[in-house]
Image: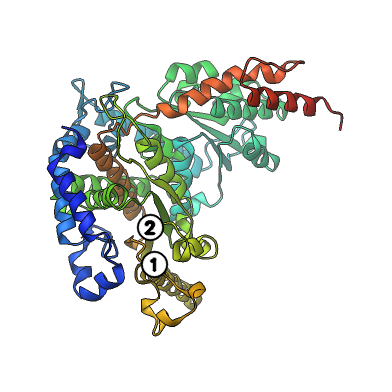
Amino acid sequence: MSLENKKSWQALQKHAQKNAHLHLSKILTDEPDRFDNFSRRSGDLLLDFSKQRINPETLQFLCDLARECDLNSWIEKLFSGERINTSENRPALHTGLRLPAGGELSLNGNNIVPGIQETLQSMEQIVSRIHAGQWQGYSGLPVDTIVNIGVGGSDLGPLMASKALSDWRLPEARKLQVLFASTMDGSQLVDHLENANPATTLFIISSKSFSTIDTLSNANTALQWLRHNSEADDEALFQHHFIGVSAAADKVADWGIPPDNHLALWDWVGGRYSMWSAIGLPVALEIGMERFREMLSGAHFMDRHFCDTEFEKNLPVLLAMIGIWNINFLDIHSHAILPYDGRLGRLHAYLQQLEMESNGKSVNREGKLVDYSTCPIIWGEVGPNAQHAFYQLLHQGTEVVSCDFIVAARRYRDSGNPELQFQQRLTLANCLAQSRILALGDSVIDGGEDTPSFKRYRGNQPSTTILLDELTPHSFGQLIALYEHKVFVQSVIWDINPFDQWGVELGKQMATGLMDPLSQPEPDTRFDSSTNGLIGSILTQQDKKT
């Protein structure tokens, strides 16, 4: 049965027509118990959706839709290892990466947990060697600079997590500089290498396929830099200065990295879901393996909550279904991620890939075009910066935008620093104030309706607040797993495959075909007129003498 023929979908359409005109200022004023009725807690997270344009009937219809779409069955398929990535004939078992030691998850008759734990042990050995100064470069000096070379999930996840957990950095890690390079133009890498010492720099080359041109071009540049700035032979350079993280052990070896420096990935882990694996090595180098395992434990806690909790109290299900309500029934197609914590400054970029690469699809699992909206546009910024940038649009613009506010209740509590404690209160006050004004508009101000039109705040912008008790490795793991499962729930409702990304492939193929024309002495005319013209202009500029 198509989605739009489901009874609960049709009920939601009628419900939206009946209630879409209601303003949050009236809803919040008329319902003094609204927070109690529309917030849920699990572990270290509180999900407050009382500022969403919903009522108890909305919530019931949404949970009915999840049941009618057989969500429970799909959750079971996800966690049991069924090949739900149908276009690539694979399971999606990133949740297995978070299973505790001694757990069991069978794939093709084999328990995959021992292999996962073995890789974690290998990570721990590497982390311990580096922290102890025992991983030495070609000259015998201990490495002090780590450059992670990857792109997409091999960059966005560990970069985001390293920044988010910076307060938990170990003392022995503070002597290390952990850097990230992803851009194919080499600009990030060149900046890093300019001040690095070749004798003490270690490169982590992270690529599931070990064939991604962006990553390999940076890796080759790093190798040439080492060759040009040392007298060591290639065997010594590969042994002392490169670690490979990949599912393609043969390609890692062919490139030159010895087996002892290879950390395994698996084809059942999607790149944007791989932070929990050896892709997270840069994170482990900063916070240590004990805290890295706490991050895994937090994600596993959310996995169990997702599997075992009824929909009406299930945080990922509620977050996802409220998104469905906004996108498909209130016609809101823009979603802002607004963390009020500078440590989460890379969260919106991470979630852009997680959500838009997963659910940015226009065909269902049967390959038929869908006639309903799927993933919204995900964007955002750290809240205090955003207040001085795009909040003008949120408060007085013509676009309706749904928002996620994310903030930690506690920080600096034990610091003994009253200035920092004041700043935390200031941050919390701004977070609460902005979500309140977005919902209520200038009804919160006495006489607000009498102000000039250019000062009016219309309100009625829906938002959810995710309140962390404190930003720790454990709560951070819960937060990221919450969003992963939100994406999965929405994919089930929309009947799309969230674990492939064919939309990024054609551009890569086209770029390969454009390499030769950009190095020819004469312009190539086999492409469209715009591309031909740009090639000609590039060649003309390259021929000019400076």
The percent coordinates of residue 487 (x first, y second) are: 31, 42
Which residue is drawn at the image coordinates 37% and 60% (left, top)?
406
Q: Nearer the viewer, mark 1 or mark 2?
A: 1
Query: In the image, is 20 to the left or to the right of 308?
Result: right
The percent coordinates of residue 498 (x first, y second) are: 32, 34
Which element type, helix, strand or loop, lies under badge 2? strand
Instruction: Identify which residue, 246 or 347, lies in the foreground.
Output: 347
Instruction: Identify which residue, 136 or 148, lies in the foreground.
Output: 148
Q: Which residue is mark 2?
A: 403
Query: In the image, is 223 to the left or to the right of 12?
Result: right
Name which residue type carries label 2.
Cys
Q: Quadrant of the N terminus?
A: top left
Is the residue 299 above or below the residue 545 in the image? below
Q: Tell me how the rendering is colored.
A: rainbow
Is the residue 354 above or below the residue 450 in the image? above
Would you call the spot at circle 2 few (<14 residues within 10 Å), some (14-19), or many (20 or more)? Answer: many
Which element type, helix, strand or loop, lies under badge 1? helix
Residue 89, quarter of picture: top left
Query: In the image, is 266 to the left or to the right of 148?
Result: left
- The mark total stands at 2
The percent coordinates of residue 423 (x first, y second) are: 48, 73
Q: How far is the residue under mark 1 from the one under mark 2?
A: 9 Å
Q: Which residue is mark 1?
A: 438
